Amino acid sequence: MVNTLIIVESPLQLVNAFEFIEKFDVTKYLIILRLSGKPINDHQMINLINLLNLDDTKIFKVTVEVNSKNFFYFIKIVSIKLFVTYSSFFLEKLLIGNYESKFMTFMMKWVGKNKIYLLDDGNKSINIQKSTDLNLFTMYDVEKKEEQIVLKNDYFGIKNIIKKDKPISNKVIFIGSGMSEIGVISEAYYLESVKAAIAHYNNLGLDFIYIPHRAESKKKISKIRKFNNVNILSLDYPIELVGLLIDFKPEKVAAFYSTAIITLSQIYNYNVETLDFNYSNSYNSKDIGNVYKYMESLNIPCLNVLKY
């Protein structure tokens, strides 16, 4: 009988579910893989099943598109919820991905709080700890609250399958962001910032490799592709697995405030740094500031090379 039920809806959540399974040698589990109808997101999750050698017989795939009012999707959601509620009487743990997702919030209802564990879903975990006392499986160093269980994700699983003898190259990997797509900053400002980053690293004698985020528009990536001295490397997997997919070790890895800066440092011991940018007028400026403060606490350098 299943004793661990895992519900995920993004590639990074699935990676972290894999890490939980590997670290605690979980065998009696079931993963509910919620596909959103977003091609890149869903494609990466399906690819991960094979790359991480997850047992496909223990994965239930269901498509529930974001904000859809389709009656068939409603029936699927209710059916899954009934299954989760019934299973909760026998479960030891329910692992949940995005705490802010309406789908996930609904799945958590009527399940004992002591059984629920939140998986990391990007930088959100840094700020979520301030608003909940649910149990965590996290890579972040957070202050444990009373009666809360915090399990450390040290990426044991990925570390066991990477090759550690790759040569260091004169390349910098720059991790793209969908910030302009969700209105944190304008696209024009984002593109100017990328240009400044290219110039900075070219001046250091480094080849600039830009890895787009899956949320970035094709139109914006096409504009970046036309910049001088930049190579675009698109991945079919989350950035956290880049070390399995390239045959070199970059001299540096940089980004604005991507979670991957932390994970790539922990998994591959990459030399990482962030670039500051003007987010003072952003709707989530406080959350962005908290992420930069956390990275500072880890002694991750923050460079000011962009024009404000």
Image (cartoon, rainbow, N blue to C red):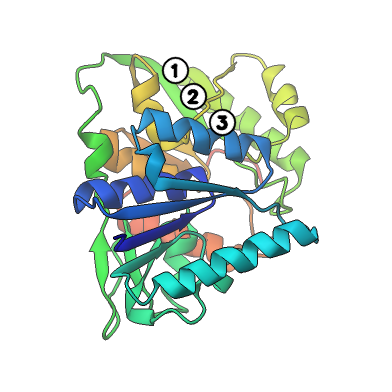
**How far is the residue under mark 2 from the one under mark 1?**
5 Å
Specify the label residue 197 is tagged with.
3
**How far is the residue under mark 2 from the one under mark 3?**
6 Å
Residue 150 shows up from this direction: yes
Judge from the rendering whether residue 139 lies leftward or rightward of residue 127; answer left or right: left
The three-letter code of the residue at mark 2 reads Tyr
Residue located 47% across and 36% down the image: 238
Residue located 41% across and 58% down the image: 6
Query: Residue 269, image x and y in percent?
Result: 25, 35
Q: Residues within 10 Å of mark 3 (few under 14, many from 20)?
A: many
Query: Residue 204, image x and y in percent?
Result: 44, 21
Circles 2, 3 touching at the beta carbon (< 8 Å): yes
Name the residue tied to disc 1.
206
Judge from the rendering whether residue 249 lies leftward or rightward of residue 240; answer left or right: left
Q: Circle 2 sits in a helix, a strand or a loop, which is it?
A: helix
Q: Circle 3 sits in a helix, a strand or a loop, which is it?
A: helix
Specify the label residue 144 is tagged with.
none
Image quadrant containing the N terminus: bottom left
Query: Residue 201, image x and y in percent?
Result: 49, 24
Q: Is residue 79 above or below residue 241?
A: below
The three-letter code of the residue at mark 3 reads Ala
Name the residue tied to disc 2.
201
| Outermost front residue | 1
Q: Nearer the viewer, residue 256 or 17?
A: 17
Q: How many marks?
A: 3
The three-letter code of the residue at mark 1 reads Leu
